[in-house]
Amino acid sequence: MAPVYFTPGPAQLYPTVAKHLQTALDKQVFSQSHRSQAFKDLYRRADEALRALLQLPADYAIYFTGSATEIWERSLQSVTAANTYHLVNGSFSKKYLDHAKWLGRNAQALQVPFGQGFSLEQVQVPAGTELLAVTQNETSSGVCMPVADIHSLRERFPEPLLSVDIVSGAPYAALDFGKVDMAFFSVQKGFGLPAGLGVWLVNERSRAKAATLEGRQYTGGHYSLQSLHDQYQQFQTPCTPNVLDIYLLTHVVEDMLAKGVAQIRKETEAKAQQVYSFLEESARFSPFVAEKAHRSPTVLVADVLEKPAAEVIAQLKAQGLVVGAGYGAHKEKQIRIANFPAVSEADMGALVSRLRAI
Ligand SMILES: *Cc1c(COP(=O)(O)O)cnc(C)c1O
């Protein structure tokens, strides 16, 4: 039997990927020109499906890039000239901050220790901040920021553009896109697709800010927000995009819509509950994130108490269950379990019973 991947990206492929891939090969989709009507129709279909799944307001546009990492950089280049503010509680939120520093921005941050989230009273965003960057789900530590907290950031700090990294939270996270200005993800996490595509969701307010900077600084060249938007008007892209992933994304999102996002959320919560209850009662594992409200439903991190985490990982792997190692310095002591829609309740049940037997 093929192994099941509980790794937080690349992750288990969504169950319908193989079927869609075969259909695309049969139809020679990957040889069609990206300037053809067939591609424009595909982009339009992707746009409609994502809009429906994520409940995007009408003023949002959807652009394709190479990765989420690229969107960190392009977003900073396109909509900021000077001041950014970042909520940093792990490696991915830290990288968004790093990109701002590399670009010479006056990048400030509120940093909390690994494994912790933010309490809203702590957050003070300086006046003059152009972009407030938050990571809805820290894939490195298993800490999530409840969407209600993100929404109240907008109420408290209406001035800066609010940019949300939803890479390992989408499509589970029920973000109200009317209360943020942009969000982005790459497809190899919650969407269960091969890596190599970033998806950038951008509202009118962000585009208006980008327009004020165009011509005054480097805004990202062929992947500037403006350039992406000019092309998007015709469902086109500035350069040859990852058509394979766009095709698969379109079809997988349609499958998710057919299943229903409410059902996906319900299953995600049930699977997360299964794992967290086990971790709480176990003598050999414990949940890493202490604050329950900040425990991620989509990337679950466990401390391994009695033996090296690598032993647990190897033991599970021998049984066809591939979990992730702890991030960076936590490699020796933690495991990470991705709970994305591609992992079924039965798969998660099997993992928990193997963990119980360790
Ligand atoms: C994986 C990840 C990224 C980076 O995604 P790439 O596709 O590798 O660029 C960014 N943010 C978060 C939260 C992630 O988990």
Image: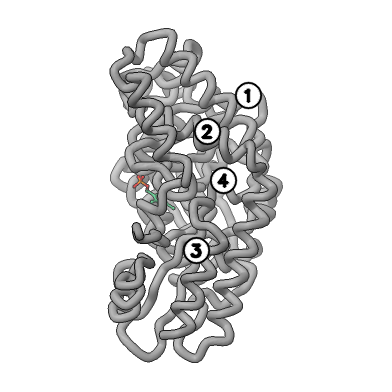
Question: Which x, y percent locates residue 269?
Answer: 63, 61
User: Where is the C terminus found, in terms of image quarters?
Assistant: bottom left
> Number of marks in the image?
4
Among numbered discs 3 and 1, the one appearing first in the sequence: 1
Among numbered discs 4 and 1, the one appearing first in the sequence: 1
Do residues under tags 4 and 2 come within 8 Å of each other at their CB atoms? no
Q: Label 1, on which residue?
A: 59
Question: Which x, y percent locates residue 243?
Answer: 36, 25
Q: Label 3, on which residue?
A: 347
Q: Amino acid at mark 3?
A: Asp
* Mark-to-mark CA distance, 2 and 3: 31 Å
Of the pair 280 and 314, the residue shown nearer to us: 314
96 left or right of 259?
left
Question: Is the residue marked 4 within 8 Å of ligand 1, measured from its CB?
Answer: no
Of the pair 65 and 1, the residue shown nearer to us: 1
Q: Amino acid at mark 4?
A: Pro
Image depth: mark 3 or mark 1 in front = 3
Q: Amino acid at mark 2?
A: Leu
Is residue 316 in view from this perspective?
A: yes
Quadrant for residue 230, please give it: top left
Among numbered discs 4 and 2, the one appearing first in the sequence: 4
Image depth: mark 2 or mark 3 in front = 3
Among numbered discs 2 and 3, the one appearing first in the sequence: 2
**Within-10-Å neighbours for mark 3: few <14, some 14–19, many 20+:** some
Residue at point 37% right, 31% down? 22
Image depth: mark 3 or mark 4 in front = 3
Q: Label 2, on which residue?
A: 201
**Within-10-Å neighbours for mark 1: few <14, some 14–19, many 20+:** few
* Mark-to-mark CA distance, 3 and 4: 19 Å
Q: Secondary structure at mark 4?
A: loop
Q: Label 4, on which residue?
A: 171
Residue at point 58% right, 66% down? 272
